[in-house]
Amino acid sequence: MAVKSHRKIPKQGGFFRTLRIALLLVLLLAVAGDAWLTHRRSTDWDESLWVSIYPINADGSAATAEYIAGLDNEAFAPVAEFMAREAARYGVAESTPMQLRLASEVRERPPVPPSNGQRLAVMGWSLQMRYWAWRVGREYVGPPSDIQVFVQYFDPAQTDRVAHSLGLQKGMIGVVNAFAARKLGGQNNVVIAHELLHTVGATDKYDLSNSLPLYPQGFADPDRDPLYPQERAEIMGGRIPLSETEADLPMSLSRTVVGPGTAAEINWVKPAS
């Protein structure tokens, strides 16, 4: 008497689903590995990192267009000088840790980050931002860029307040919101330097609820007596603390420093054990 088999034939769909998951895992591991290697290489500081600055006329005004037309590499030289000065204080061997070059104007705005801050939305926006930066940067002519910074300029006669700037370590991309005014060029450079340091691993050192620098890591001189007013800003603290409730934006990088906590994050010094 024949015995009937009850063994089911595997469905083909299950095989392809498993294959898709396996391929996705391999892709995620490759992306993670590439990000890790990029971060290690970018913070070895054994050679200069090339930074491309892409201006964007964010309000479409004639005044902003005129300001962008007058930009050159010298406009961003204080940022490179600041990085060199601060790196030397920590004994970094590379004398020019970052070199900034003006790239062509970008005619479109970058993707807007999600307002809700949900993790999946932020991850999706990050991927979208990285693709956008790759796409608009394909026509750049110059040394290969390690870091891309897109500076959105606004005419201060029309806009008195701009949105927060941001820097992405994954992808090494910065988006800076700045004012199209020569008298505010120094302040713009402070923001550019802040976001550049985000791309190599530095974290914010200010209270997100009120923008006041955190003590002691967000203070340039935390041992000062009396503590207030401070005379300089820690670059990732962002502002010069004047009192427990007041702080001013520095007008230039000459009044900012890289604190020891930030230096440790970007591998200028070894973290304290």
Image (cartoon, grey):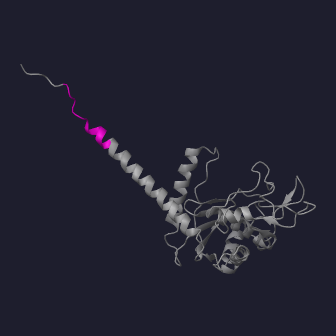
Task: Say if the magenta span includes residue 7.
Answer: yes
The C terminus, quarter of image = bottom right
138 relative to 201 in the view: left or right: left
In the image: residue 216, left or right of residue 273: right
Q: Looking at the rendering, which quadrant does residue 173 occupy?
A: bottom right
Q: Which residue is drawn at 52% across and 54% down?
A: 127
Q: Nearer the viewer, residue 89 or 157?
A: 89
Instruction: Return the residue nearer the eye: 259 or 213.
Output: 259
Pick out the residue farthest to the left. Answer: 1
Q: Position of residue 190 (x, y in %)?
A: 74, 68
At x 52% / y 61%, what residue is drawn?
A: 36
Q: In which quarter of the image is residue 238?
A: bottom right
Quadrant in which the N terminus appears: top left
* Residue 101 appears left or right of 19: right
166 inside magenta stretch: no
Q: Residue furthest top?
A: 1
User: What is the x, y in percent for residue 40?
Assistant: 55, 65
Q: Which residue lies furthest to the right in this view?
A: 226
**Residue 60 in sight:** no
Above or below, comparing residue 36 to residue 7 in the picture: below
Given residues 28 and 147, the one toward you in this image is 28
Q: Where is residue 160 in the image (x, y as percent from the top left)?
A: 78, 59
Say whether residue 17 is left or right of residue 31. left
In this picture, which residue range is highlighted in magenta? Answer: 6-16
